[in-house]
Amino acid sequence: MGMTALSYLLGGMLVWGGIGWLVDHYVGTKGIFAGIGVVIGTAGGVYLIVRRLGA
C-alpha cells in the first residue's frame, strides 16, 4: 500500500509538473506554471491516496 501511495504522489507531481513545464515553454515564462503544476499534482495525489486508500 505504501508503494501505491508513493506512486500516486510522484505520478501526480511528474504529470502535472510536466504539463506546467510545457505551458511555461509555450508562454515563455520560467518555471511559474511548472511550480503550480507540481503543487496541483501533489494535491491530486494526496486526494487520491485519501479517496482510494482511506489513509
Image (cartoon, helix red, strand yellow):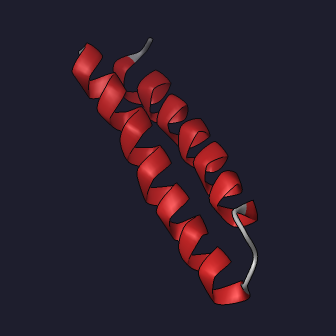
How many numbered tags mark residues here? Answer: 0
Residue at 63% in and 48% down: 40
Q: Position of residue 31 (x, y in %)?
A: 69, 63
Instruction: Give the vertical position of 12 relative to 53 (above or below).
Output: below
Instruction: Give the vertical position of 46 relative to 27 (above or below).
Output: above
| Quadrant of the rendered image containing residue 8 | top left
Which residue is more in the foreground, 36 or 47? 36
Quadrant of the snapshot with the N terminus:
top left
Q: Position of residue 17 (x, y in %)?
A: 53, 57
Residue at 24% in and 21% down: 3
Residue at 65% in and 44% down: 39
**Is 4 positioned to the left or the right of 41 in the image?**
left
**Is 6 positioned to the left or the right of 20 in the image?**
left
Which residue is more in the foreground, 47 or 9? 9
Instruction: Give the vertical position of 35 relative to 30 (above or below).
Output: above
Q: Position of residue 22 (x, y in %)?
A: 54, 77
Which residue is more in the foreground, 43 or 27? 27
Which residue is more in the foreground, 6 or 32? 32
**Is 3 positioned to the left or the right of 8 in the image?**
left
